[in-house]
Image (cartoon, rainbow, N blue to C red):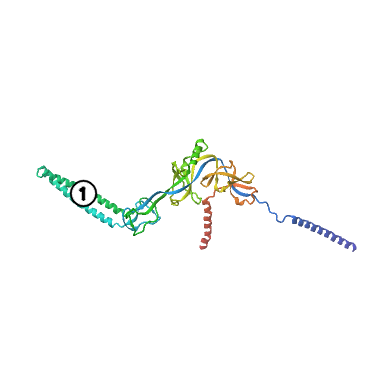
Amino acid sequence: MARRNQGVDLGMLAGAVVALAMLAGCGKGGDATAQAPAGAKPAMPPAQVGVVTVQLQSVPVMNELPGRLEAFRTAQVRARVAGILQRRLFTEGADVKAGQALFQIDPATYQAALDSALATQARAEANQAQAQALVKRYEPLQSAKAISPQEYLNAQVAERQANADVQSAKAAVQAARINLGYASVTSPIAGRIGRALVTEGALVGQGEVTQLAVVQQVNPLYVNFTQSANEVMKLRQALNSGTLKKAGEQAASIRVVMDDGREYPLSGKLLFSDLTVDTTSGQVSLRAELPNPQGLLLPGMYVRVRLEQAQVDGGFLLPQQAVTRTAQADTVMVVAPDGMVSPRPVKIGGARGNQWVVLGGLKDGEQVMVDGFQKMMNPKAPVKAVPWKAPDVTAMVTPAASSATAASAPSVAASR
């Protein structure tokens, strides 16, 4: 019995040793887990930014000049006869056609003058007929020596006077008809009419030619702008020396920038450049013609005119959002092959559409950052450069339309 108890005690002791070893192993594993950093995060991937690869090319030399819009044609509508203004026949600010009636002046006086002129013409024609009949009756009598030559001569003179009276009466009738027509004031040109400068019941044309309204043709418009004579001379010298080369057939086209910085979508054409220099300002006057089919532009508006006058080799074109413009310098963000981003000052030579013309500061083949600036949390961290694509307006609208269609589908199904 003692040996059996001793064997049981040895077996229990061996089991306890094994259990302690397992607990020790579990304790070591728990300590190892506890030693790992609790706040550690996996490494973040590099930020993805859109870039464009610049290429050397011939770029335009753009000048941005101040200008004013002017109506293509302007006509002052005036009263050409005196009278009381009875009616205004147009809507202020509307488009009118050439010859369209705009005002009606009381025509009673001019109708009476026309009737009087017609009566005078009828009397003159009656006298003419009587004088002509007398001459015809005297012709055979003159041949037969039945009347004296003086009587026949008097009859011929009376006929000529009657003919002259008829012509004078016809001229008076024509003048009376013209004055009666002037009682209906019409538009001399097609265009947009402004506000009425007189009201119904006003006496117009009495002693002076009263201005009633103004009609302006606003499609197309003129753009009047000026350029420094010194700039013109420098440009011509650069062209003659070969530093710059002449632009192509599109050199005569211009672009207009609105006062809020937006570029007008339609281009205009340069009409002429003045041959003389203003002695007071030293400026040369230029004029361009600009289409305005929708009437968005108005005469008198201040604009900036972008004019391409030459081209230079070795420049770049960049999207405008890639350039940061300040009073100190114009800079871009250049992405190196290793993904590091660094600022680079550049020289801007004007704009062409929605792109800046860069004349210096970049090398051929470099990658310039266009979007993804907000993703750069650490400016010293590398980035992942991907080709940038200009946003497509139609593509931006399509998803919204499709989502709206998808949202409406359940309601249609539910209605069924």
Q: Residue 143, image x and y in percent? A: 11, 42
Q: Is disc 1 placed on a helix, strand or loop?
A: helix
Name, please, the residue furthest toward the front. 280
On screen, residue 63 above or below 101: above
Quadrant for the N terminus, please. Answer: bottom right
Name the residue: 85% across, 60% down: 13
Residue 415 appears left or right of 5: left
Name the residue: 25% across, 51% down: 172
Name the residue: 13% across, 44% down: 150
Report which residue position mark 1 lands on: 165
Name the residue: 15% across, 46% down: 154
- Residue 374 visible in the displayed image: yes
Name, please, the residue furthest toward the bottom. 1
Residue 358 appears left or right of 70: right
Q: Nearer the viewer, residue 389 or 9?
A: 389
On screen, residue 105 above or below 319: below
Q: Residue 284, image x and y in percent? A: 46, 43
